[in-house]
Image (cartoon, rainbow, N blue to C red):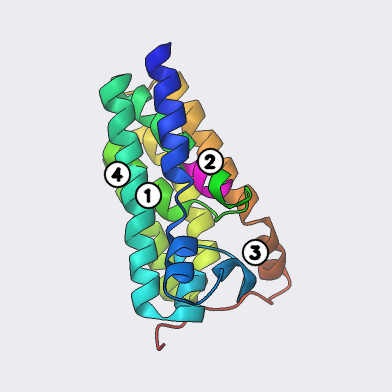
Amino acid sequence: MLKILLTVVISYLLGSCATGIIYSRMSGNGDIRTKGSKNSGATNMLRVLGKKAALITLLGDILKGSLAAFIGKWLVGGTLGGMIGALFAVLGHNYPVFFGFKGGKGIATSLGSLLVVLPVPSLIAFAVFVVTVSLTRYVSLGSILAAITVPVAYLFTMPFELPVFLICLLMAFLAIYRHRANIGRLRRHEENKISFSK
């Protein structure tokens, strides 16, 4: 029980280290959450601060997710331990204790953690994301479809463990919930498309 608690706390604190917010403040650009879509993720960083800021944010968010998953596997053991680390890293990213519990949407952090724990489902989900964004230029739509893909792909590619599957479903729900405003804009055809020209 102590090891699970340690995994929860460490993973949540890691997730709370919001790369985009830290980078935007340290680079003299204020709080990224006050600009653009007011999100701290790589997509808003790209739109507001450019490719370098977006890449640093993306890599930082992926790395902290991977680290949390490794810690979970090390402390608790097995796929379930890694998934506990993954879940709480995403919760930390979405609701960071260091930044007023107002964070991002958890997609890059989910990817980083799931690559460690569920590599095949996460790679399938990443492929869905890439194809969707390439065809539509909607990062939000790609993120939502990728989130849905993970638990479905898990059922067909991994030995089934109910607790692991339930965490997959919870992470997918979190991703969709955090995109609820985007879903509304997609339905109204008002969602912004991504541009890589900046």
Magenta region: 90-95
Report which residue position mark 3 lands on: 182
Q: Looking at the image, do the residues carrying marks 4 and 1 touch, with CB atoms under 8 Å apart? A: yes
Residue 111 badge:
1
- Which of the pair 41/174 is nearer the observer? 41
Q: Under tag 1, what secondary structure?
A: helix
- Name the image quarter holding residue 197: bottom left
Q: What's the CA distance linking mark 1 and mark 3?
A: 20 Å
Q: Residue at x 35, y 47 (%)?
A: 64
Report which residue position mark 2 lands on: 91
What amino acid is at disc 1?
Leu
Tell which circle, 1 or 2, labels the residue nearer the N-terminal end.
Answer: 2
Q: Main secondary structure of the magenta part?
A: helix
Disc 1 packing (10 Å; few <14; some 14–19; many ≥20): many
Q: Quadrant of the image for the C terminus?
A: bottom left
Give the percent coordinates (x, y) of residue 29.
50, 77
Give the percent coordinates (x, y) of residue 149.
45, 47
Report which residue position mark 4 lands on: 115
What amino acid is at disc 3?
Asn
Tell which circle, 1 or 3, labels the residue nearer the N-terminal end.
Answer: 1
- Name the image quarter holding residue 83: top left
Q: What's the CA distance linking mark 4 and mark 1?
A: 6 Å
Tell which circle, 3 or 4, labels the residue nearer the N-terminal end.
Answer: 4
- Name the image quarter holding residue 35: bottom right
In the rendered structure, the answer to whether residue 88 lies left or right of residue 52 reads right
Disc 3 packing (10 Å; few <14; some 14–19; many ≥20): many
Q: Under tag 3, what secondary structure?
A: helix
Q: What's the CA distance linking mark 1 and mark 2?
A: 14 Å
